Structures are given as C-alpha cells and as structure tokens.
Amino acid sequence: MVAPEGRSRWGGPPSPRDLGFTWAVFVAALLPRLYVAIAWAREPVWDGHYYDFGAKRIAAGLGYGDDVVLDGHPVWHPWCHYPVGYSGFLGLVYRIFGEGPHVATVANAVTGALLCAVVHRLARHATTPGRARLAALFAALSPGLIVYSALLMTEPLAALGIIVAAWLFVREERPLHRGLAAGVVMGLTALVRPQSLLCLPGLALLAIPGDGAWSSRLLAAARPTAVALASALVVVAPWTARNCAVMDGCALVSTNAGWNLAIGAFPRATGRFETLHASDGCPVVTGQVQQDRCWRDEGLRWIAADPRRWIGLMPDKLSFTFDHESFPMGYLGEADPDTWPEARKARGRELLSGIHRALLALAALGVVGWPFTRGMSLRDRLTQAALLALVVALGLRGLLSDLHPAWPLALVLPVVAVLPLPGRPRNGGVIGYLALAVASVAATHAVFFGEDRYHMVVTPALCVLAACALRMGRRTGATAP
C-alpha cells in the first residue's frame, strides 16, 4: 500500500524542515505571481471575459446566465456552454472581497502558489526529498505559470485540482477516506475542466500494493478508485440536474464538447481553434444543448466521411498543443496592446516556449532509467540507453529545429512510463498518475483541436517528472515497486 504522508517510502517521514520548505516555496511562488497579478492585469479578454461576466452574475445572486429581452422585459437566460467551475470560484471570491480590478488576479496568484506547495507535497511520494524540492522550484519559477496569474483562465485552478486529488489519495491509507477526499476534489475540478475526469483511472495506480497476487492487488486498487469515481459524480450531479431542469436538454457539465469536435473535424479545420458559422452545418438552433448536439452530429458525420483527413490532422493538433507556449503573451497583448507591442510579445513567446520545451524533454527523461547504474544487466543497459538516446534526440529536435516539434515527447512519455521495459526506473504510482495526466491532454486534443494553453494544466505534472530525470535504472534482480 502507498504510505501516508507521515511515512513516505521514498524519503522517510516529512520532517518539520520538509513542511518548512513547503511554506517557503509557497511564499517564493506567491511573490512574483502577486506582482504580475497587480502590475499586468487588465480588463479580461477572450474566454476570460465570459468567465468574469459569469462570476459577477453568480456573485450578485443572479445565477449562471444572462438576461434577454422578450416583449420588452428582461428574462433570465441560463448558460452552460462554458463549464461553471471557474466562474463559480471567482463568484465566491467576488462575493467575499468585492469586484475590484485585481481581486480575480490576486486569487489566481494565491491559487498558483498553492499549486506549487502541493506539487512539493505530492512529489515527496514520488521521489527523494531533494528531487521533490526541485520539482516545487520548477513549478514556482515557471514563467508560464507566473504570467498566468494575470489571465482569467481556468488552467491553473484545474491543475490544482488534479494535483490535490492525487496528494489526498496518496497520503491516506484508509480506502474509503482516500476515495472520498480525492473524488470530491476531482468532481469540483470536473466543474472547471470536465476532461479532468480522465485522470480518475490513474488514481488506481496510486493504490496498487507493492506485493501480493495480482488479483488481490487490483482489487485493493479498484475499491478506493471506485469510491473516488462515485464521489466525483455525486459532486457533479447537482449541476447536471440543474442543466436538465433549466436548459433545453441535459448536459453533464457544459455544452462545448460537440462544438469542439466539429472545430477539429469540419472542412475548414486546421488543427487549432477556428470559428464555426451557421453556414458550416447548424443554421437553426433553439438552445445551447441542441446546438451542441447538432455540432456533435455534424462532427461525427465529417469524421465518418473522411476519417483519414481527421486522423491526419492529429499531428497538427498535438503540435498546436505542445510545441510552444504563446497564449499568455497573446492574452496580455489583447488586453493591453500599448504595453505589449509585437516585439515584446515575440520575446515573451520565445522565452516561455523555450522553457516549456526544455521542461517537456526533462519530463520525458523522468521515466527513463540511467543506463550506467551499477548492477544493471547488459540488456537493461542497452534498453535504457536506447530510450535515453531517443528522448535526447527528440528533445534536441524540439529545441533546435526551425519548427520546434516537441509534441512527440508528450506521446513517448506516457508510453515509456507504462511499458515494463527492461531496466526501467521505479515508476511508482505517482509517476504513472502524472504520465496518465499528460496522456489525457494529448488524447483529448488529438480528438478535438489543439491550442498551447491546454498543456498548461499538466505543466505542474511535468515539473515533478522533470525533477525525476536521470534516476537510477532498476538493478538486476530488483523487484518492481
């Protein structure tokens, strides 16, 4: 069984010094984020405008929606196109602290700092104390995560939920308690980013005991994971019931899955976001649910008509998702074009993208064993040396070539993490869970469409994996963890 917080099998009991570092990294992460949140924040733009508008409506007690005029009178019009979670979070913040110009971005800064602290706590169950601190520092100093404090976007809050759920699950030994705690957090996270539910199966990797028959080990892992799944669905259920009651049909969380599928499949699809028009296939709609179902049906029809074209777009979708980190600069430039002229944005994009690609390459090395570990067999050495050469080659290609194709690393990472290859390092439950989180983003946006902001939700996971780079490979005769 995975040891609880007090008895980490990797680094021993977390000492007061460990907890002190967690607090220190929280403060170190908070300071630059507060500066960005206050100095760089402007009127929210793009999707941030809708999140902010929805939050202010919620804070005012008007629910998640707007008003439309019918027969000269305003009538409440419910929404669920965008997931409610982030607007609900900001609505609570606005309700408590008011709607001042920096309230939301300061809340983002605190969220980002908490994320770095929890990265440290989770990493203590994945690797040595020193590497866990390195993971926390990677997250604290990530320029992309720092800049995100000025953006009213969902990714840091969703990332916090994914990391907190795993930490609560791994630190608690009692199956019911760990399943309930992680499930509640994952349910709340699903209200922010519905595809976060794809990480739920990864919780089973955190619960597999280190010894015993496979059947008993799988059963021991399945029980708390099933509790987590049920708990998450219970948390989401009231919102689903609300949608069924006030919308023109039922929707689990939001009504943009069909829309996004169509964007990734329609005749003008490029692999990234493109605006859909009524003339593309849904000229008459009566509500958000009906509209989403129409676009879903159209998307499936386009895929069935030309599956090779749709599959052929997947590399482009993954490229738009993982090859660069441009969205934060674009958002800042849209909100304040005088402060962020094109030359300054270009420098920012180059910095953020270069660090992201390096982090992704290091994260891929986190699932490869150091081939020169003493005691490894020749077969183990050759296997891990080949993997090391592959990852290094892909990393250098992503960093140095003109097109910077970093996305293959996002595919290699989860595949290598799960394959029982000779000489692989001790890829414990946390490593497997984080690799699955990366795989969930890759799979989601290969199906729908890609944008670089979507990889931000797994940047903290990449920080933990990167801190594990070049670990010792498994010695000959060593047993799996």
Image (spheres, helix red, strand yellow):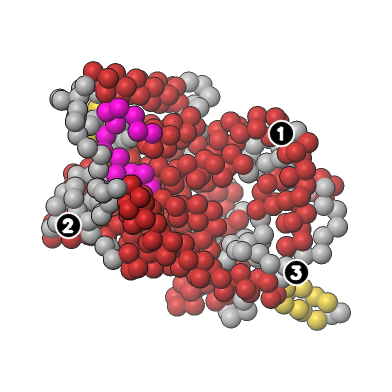
Name the front one of labels 2 and 3. Answer: 2
| Alpha carbon separation for disc pair 1 and 3 | 31 Å
Kind of residue sitting beneath label 2:
Arg
Which of the 4 quarters of the picture holds residue 380? Answer: top left
Q: Amino acid at mark 3?
A: Asp
Q: Main secondary structure of the magenta part?
A: loop
Q: Is residue 283 visible?
A: yes
The foreground one among 151 and 367 is 367
Name the side, left or right, on which 224 lies relative to 154: left
Position of residue 454 relative to residue 50, above or below, is above
The residue under label 1 is which amino acid type? Answer: Pro
Tell me where residue 45 appears, x and y as whole percent. 60, 55
> Does the stretch in magenta take in 320?
no
Residue 440 lies, in percent from the top left, at: 50, 45
- Mark 1 or mark 3: name the one nearer the start of the chain: 3
Which residue position holds label 1?
307
| Residue 32 drawn at (x, y percent) | 34, 53
Labels 2 and 3: the sequence-earlier one: 2
Return the mark for residue 7: 2
Name the residue at 50% across, 36% down. 322
Number of other residues with Cα within 10 Å of mark 2, as a class: few under 14, some 14 to 19, many 20 or more: some
Label 1 CA crowd tier, 10 Å (few <14, some 14–19, many 20+): some
Image quadrant where one finds the C terminus = top left
What residue would you read off at disc 3? 248
What is the magenta range?
A: 419-433
Give the distance between the C-alpha atoms of the residues marked 2 and 1, in whole angstroms. 51 Å
Q: Are marks 1 and 3 in contact (CB under 8 Å)?
A: no
Residue drawn at (60%, 63%) of the image: 253
Secondary element at tag 1: helix
Q: Secondary structure at mark 3?
A: loop
